[in-house]
Image (spheres, helix red, strand yellow):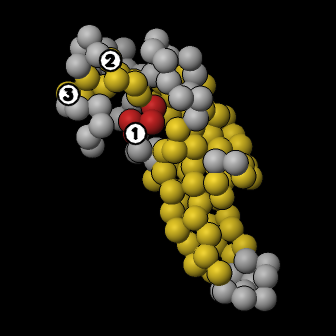
Amino acid sequence: MPARLADGDAPAAAVTLENVGPRAGGETVQVYLAPPAPPVQQAPRVLAGFERVHLEPGERRRVRVALDPRAFAYWDEAARGWRPAPGRYRVEAAASSRDIRLTADVTFAARASPESERGDPGSK
Protein backbone atom coordinates (compact mmCIF):
# COMPACT_ATOMS: atom_id res chain seq x y z
CA MET A 1 0.00 0.00 0.00
CA PRO A 2 1.42 3.42 -0.83
CA ALA A 3 2.10 5.73 2.08
CA ARG A 4 -0.42 8.24 0.67
CA LEU A 5 -3.86 7.73 -0.87
CA ALA A 6 -6.26 10.24 -2.38
CA ASP A 7 -10.03 10.19 -2.59
CA GLY A 8 -10.95 8.23 -5.72
CA ASP A 9 -7.95 5.86 -5.54
CA ALA A 10 -8.65 2.11 -5.49
CA PRO A 11 -7.13 1.25 -2.11
CA ALA A 12 -5.48 -2.13 -1.58
CA ALA A 13 -2.98 -3.70 0.78
CA ALA A 14 -0.50 -6.44 -0.07
CA VAL A 15 1.20 -8.95 2.22
CA THR A 16 3.39 -11.99 1.64
CA LEU A 17 2.29 -15.29 3.17
CA GLU A 18 4.36 -18.43 3.51
CA ASN A 19 3.23 -21.89 4.57
CA VAL A 20 6.11 -23.16 6.72
CA GLY A 21 4.22 -26.28 7.78
CA PRO A 22 4.32 -29.80 6.33
CA ARG A 23 0.67 -29.72 5.10
CA ALA A 24 -1.38 -27.60 2.74
CA GLY A 25 -3.51 -25.05 4.51
CA GLY A 26 -5.67 -21.99 4.24
CA GLU A 27 -5.52 -18.53 5.74
CA THR A 28 -7.86 -15.59 5.60
CA VAL A 29 -5.91 -12.35 5.44
CA GLN A 30 -7.96 -9.62 7.09
CA VAL A 31 -7.08 -5.94 6.75
CA TYR A 32 -8.33 -3.48 9.35
CA LEU A 33 -8.17 0.30 9.39
CA ALA A 34 -7.90 2.37 12.54
CA PRO A 35 -9.27 5.74 11.40
CA PRO A 36 -8.23 9.18 12.59
CA ALA A 37 -10.68 11.02 14.81
CA PRO A 38 -13.58 11.79 12.43
CA PRO A 39 -16.28 14.36 13.19
CA VAL A 40 -18.62 11.54 14.27
CA GLN A 41 -18.21 8.66 16.71
CA GLN A 42 -16.78 5.57 15.00
CA ALA A 43 -15.42 2.16 15.92
CA PRO A 44 -11.70 2.20 16.78
CA ARG A 45 -11.03 -0.31 13.97
CA VAL A 46 -13.00 -1.42 10.90
CA LEU A 47 -12.61 -4.47 8.68
CA ALA A 48 -11.77 -2.95 5.30
CA GLY A 49 -11.13 -6.11 3.28
CA PHE A 50 -10.17 -9.77 3.35
CA GLU A 51 -8.90 -12.49 1.06
CA ARG A 52 -8.94 -16.27 1.53
CA VAL A 53 -5.72 -18.01 0.42
CA HIS A 54 -4.75 -21.69 0.06
CA LEU A 55 -1.04 -22.53 0.22
CA GLU A 56 0.81 -25.78 -0.37
CA PRO A 57 3.67 -26.76 2.00
CA GLY A 58 6.59 -24.38 1.48
CA GLU A 59 4.59 -22.14 -0.86
CA ARG A 60 5.07 -18.38 -0.57
CA ARG A 61 2.66 -15.93 -2.21
CA ARG A 62 2.05 -12.18 -2.34
CA VAL A 63 -1.62 -11.53 -1.56
CA ARG A 64 -3.43 -8.35 -2.60
CA VAL A 65 -6.46 -7.36 -0.53
CA ALA A 66 -8.81 -4.79 -2.07
CA LEU A 67 -10.08 -2.36 0.56
CA ASP A 68 -13.59 -0.96 0.71
CA PRO A 69 -13.31 2.79 -0.04
CA ARG A 70 -16.05 3.43 2.53
CA ALA A 71 -13.60 2.38 5.23
CA PHE A 72 -12.00 5.79 4.56
CA ALA A 73 -15.31 7.64 5.04
CA TYR A 74 -18.07 8.29 7.54
CA TRP A 75 -21.82 8.63 7.17
CA ASP A 76 -22.85 12.29 7.40
CA GLU A 77 -26.43 12.23 8.65
CA ALA A 78 -27.05 15.91 7.93
CA ALA A 79 -25.95 15.52 4.30
CA ARG A 80 -27.43 11.99 4.03
CA GLY A 81 -24.26 10.80 2.34
CA TRP A 82 -20.77 9.39 2.79
CA ARG A 83 -17.97 11.88 3.46
CA PRO A 84 -14.26 11.17 3.10
CA ALA A 85 -12.39 11.24 6.41
CA PRO A 86 -8.87 12.50 5.63
CA GLY A 87 -5.98 11.81 7.96
CA ARG A 88 -3.46 9.18 9.00
CA TYR A 89 -4.84 5.64 9.25
CA ARG A 90 -3.22 2.65 10.89
CA VAL A 91 -3.45 -0.33 8.49
CA GLU A 92 -3.38 -3.73 10.19
CA ALA A 93 -2.97 -7.08 8.42
CA ALA A 94 -4.28 -9.88 10.60
CA ALA A 95 -5.47 -13.44 10.94
CA SER A 96 -8.27 -12.04 13.15
CA SER A 97 -9.11 -8.80 14.94
CA ARG A 98 -7.20 -10.13 17.96
CA ASP A 99 -4.23 -11.46 16.00
CA ILE A 100 -2.61 -8.45 14.28
CA ARG A 101 0.54 -9.54 12.44
CA LEU A 102 1.67 -6.47 10.48
CA THR A 103 0.97 -2.73 10.72
CA ALA A 104 1.69 0.31 8.60
CA ASP A 105 0.45 3.89 8.40
CA VAL A 106 -1.14 5.52 5.38
CA THR A 107 -2.28 9.11 4.91
CA PHE A 108 -5.59 9.59 3.14
CA ALA A 109 -6.23 12.96 1.48
CA ALA A 110 -9.77 13.98 0.48
CA ARG A 111 -10.60 16.18 -2.46
CA ALA A 112 -10.96 19.89 -1.75
CA SER A 113 -14.73 19.69 -2.41
CA PRO A 114 -15.79 16.18 -1.39
CA GLU A 115 -18.99 14.88 -2.90
CA SER A 116 -21.23 12.64 -0.88
CA GLU A 117 -22.28 9.26 -2.10
CA ARG A 118 -25.98 9.23 -1.40
CA GLY A 119 -27.64 6.16 -0.08
CA ASP A 120 -28.31 4.10 2.99
CA PRO A 121 -25.30 3.82 5.36
CA GLY A 122 -25.66 0.04 5.42
CA SER A 123 -25.81 -0.46 1.67
CA LYS A 124 -22.99 -0.69 -0.86
Question: Would you name the residue on which mark 3 appears?
Answer: 118
User: Which quarter of the image is occupied by the C terminus?
Assistant: top left
| The quadrant where residue 34 appears | top right
The foreground one among 34 and 67 is 34
Residue at image point 29% right, 16% down:
77
* Image disc number at residue 69: 1
Callout in the foreground (2, 1): 2
Residue bearing mark 2? 76
Is residue 105 toward the left or the right of residue 49 in the image?
right
Q: Residue visible at 72% across and 73% down?
A: 18
> Rounded to the nearest whole Å, what is the CA distance between mark 2 and mark 1?
15 Å
Q: Locate residue 110, reporting x and y percent.
A: 42, 22
Measured Cα–Cα span from mark 2 to mark 3: 10 Å
Which residue is nearer to you in this view: 19 or 109?
A: 19
**Could you tell me if residue 64 is visible in this image?**
yes
Quadrant position of residue 28: bottom right
Q: Position of residue 2 (x, y in %)?
A: 58, 42
Hey, what amino acid is under mark 3? Arg
Q: Is residue 62 above or below residue 105?
A: below
Query: Alpha carbon of mark 3 to alpha carbon of mark 1: how far?
Result: 14 Å
Q: Secondary structure at mark 1?
A: helix
| Label 3 neighbour load within 10 Å: few <14, some 14-19, many 20+ | few
Mark earlier in primary sequence (2, 3) = 2
Q: Position of residue 7 (x, y in %)?
A: 39, 30
